[in-house]
Amino acid sequence: MTNAEQPNRLALIEALLLQTVQQQQANTAAITQLTQQQQNNTATISQLAQQQAELKQELQDSISHLVSVIGNFVEEAHQDRAIIRELQSEVRGIQTENQRILQYLFGRQGER
């Protein structure tokens, strides 16, 4: 290698080293930014997981309450049916008694 080629080669090495340093700085900045974004994402995921757990519990509580309310409605409906059957039986008895009274009255009327 000649003395004339030496400065060009040194200049090329210096330029490559400068480029490498600049690229390393850019990579370091990008890694720092990605690390911060990853930390932000992790925090957001943790918040979302907590919200999801709270919403799940609220939903389970709501479903349990709804099942309880429906159970009460069903129980009350059975009680209402029993009362209705009892009333129907009483009405049939009253209807039968009314029929007997009418028959008696009409029979007595025919005797006159």
Image (cartoon, rainbow, N blue to C red):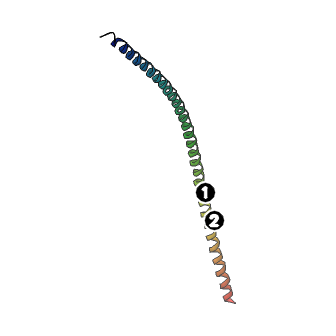
Nearest the eye: 28 or 87: 28
Q: Is residue 109 left or right of residue 30?
A: right
Q: Residue furthest front?
A: 4
Could you give the CA–CA distance between mark 1 and mark 2, rounded to whole angstroms? 12 Å
Nearest the eye: 84 or 9: 9
**Mark 1 belongs to which amino acid?**
Gln
How would you rate the neighbour count of disc 1 (Cα within 10 Å): few for under 14, some for 14-19, many for 20 or more? few
Whether residues under marks 1 and 2 lie with C-beta atoms below 8 angstroms apart, the answer is: no
**Quadrant position of residue 44:** top right
What is the number of the mark on residue 8?
none
Nearest the eye: 16 or 20: 16
For disc 2, the marked residue is: 87
Nearest the eye: 34 or 76: 34
Q: Residue furthest right?
A: 112
| Callout 1 secondary element | helix
Report the residue at 66% width, 78% height from top.
Answer: 101
**Mark 2 belongs to which amino acid?**
Leu
| Image location (x, y in percent) of residue 12 | 38, 17
Placement of 111 over or under 83, stated as above or below: below
For disc 1, the marked residue is: 79
| Image location (x, y in percent) of residue 45 | 52, 33
